[in-house]
Image (cartoon, rainbow, N blue to C red):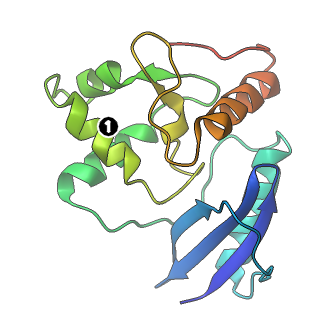
């Protein structure tokens, strides 16, 4: 499986490719030797991540695929509908999915998202506006939301 390591403002991201799809983007909590992208798709993924962190890209358009149940796939597809620089609550996500009682299951599926930044689970927050439930660290979630808000010129996190 081809792998690249890419240095982001929030740490080193490990990007994996399988069967011509990007299958994961993880931010690591440790330093690892850098591995340059060797395949055309990994090069595109790194370029688009560069553009995102430079404030020049809001949507990723390389092919992605994650392993997960049909429910998880539905949750991750819903995350792709959240606009850049915007947030929704877990309750709002459950309503978008027409499954208002599945808040905990949706939050759990969000937590299993393997495509950091690309599938924007960082845009889902608590109903009270708190930055909850982010496996990569709340400080990274806050940074990403502030980065997006600054990029679109609102200067602060836009809640709901």
In the rendered image, residue 50, in percent from the top left (x then y), is placed at 81, 56
Q: Is residue 18 placed above or below 79 in the rendered structure? A: below
Total tally of numbered discs in the picture = 1
Q: From the viewer's perspective, is 20 left or right of 12?
A: left
Q: Is residue 102 placed above or below 20 in the rendered structure? A: above
User: Residue at the location (29% across, 44% down)?
Assistant: 108
User: Residue at the location (49% across, 47% down)?
Assistant: 135
Q: From the viewer's perspective, is 156 left or right of 14?
A: right
Residue 62 is at least partly visible in this image: no
In the rendered image, residue 116, in percent from the top left (x then y), is placed at 56, 53
Q: Nearer the viewer, residue 97 or 121?
A: 121
SS assignment at label 1: helix
The outermost residue toward the top is 128
User: Residue at the location (20% across, 60% down)?
Assistant: 69
Q: Residues within 10 Å of mark 1 (few under 14, many from 20)?
A: many
User: Residue at the location (32% across, 68% down)?
Assistant: 67
Asked where in the image residue 102 lies, by quadrant, the reply is top left
The outermost residue toward the front is 30
In the rendered image, residue 61, in percent from the top left (x then y), is placed at 60, 56
Asked where in the image residue 138 lies, by quadrant, the reply is top right
Q: Is residue 27 placed above or below 120 in the rendered structure? A: below
Asked where in the image residue 140 lies, by quadrant, the reply is top right
The outermost residue toward the right is 54
In the rendered image, residue 157, in percent from the top left (x then y), is placed at 66, 17
The residue that label 1 is drawn on is: 107
């Amino acid at each position: 499986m081809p792998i690249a390591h890419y240095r982001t403002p929030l740490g080193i991201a490990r990007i994996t490719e399988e069967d011509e799809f990007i299958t994961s983007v993880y931010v690591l909590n440790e330093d690892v030797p850098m591995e340059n992208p060797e395949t055309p798709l990994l090069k595109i993924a790194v370029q688009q991540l560069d553009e995102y962190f430079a404030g020049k890209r809001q949507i990723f358009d390389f092919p992605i695929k994650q392993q997960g149940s049909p429910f998880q796939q539905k949750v991750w597809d819903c995350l792709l509908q959240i606009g850049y620089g915007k947030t929704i609550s877990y309750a709002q996500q459950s309503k978008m999915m027409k499954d208002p009682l599945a808040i905990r299951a949706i939050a759990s599926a969000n937590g299993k998202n393997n495509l950091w930044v690309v599938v924007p689970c960082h845009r889902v927050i608590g109903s009270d506006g708190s930055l909850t439930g982010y496996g990569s660290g709340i400080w990274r979630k806050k940074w990403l939301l502030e980065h997006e808000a600054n990029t679109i010129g609102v200067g602060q996190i836009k809640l709901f």
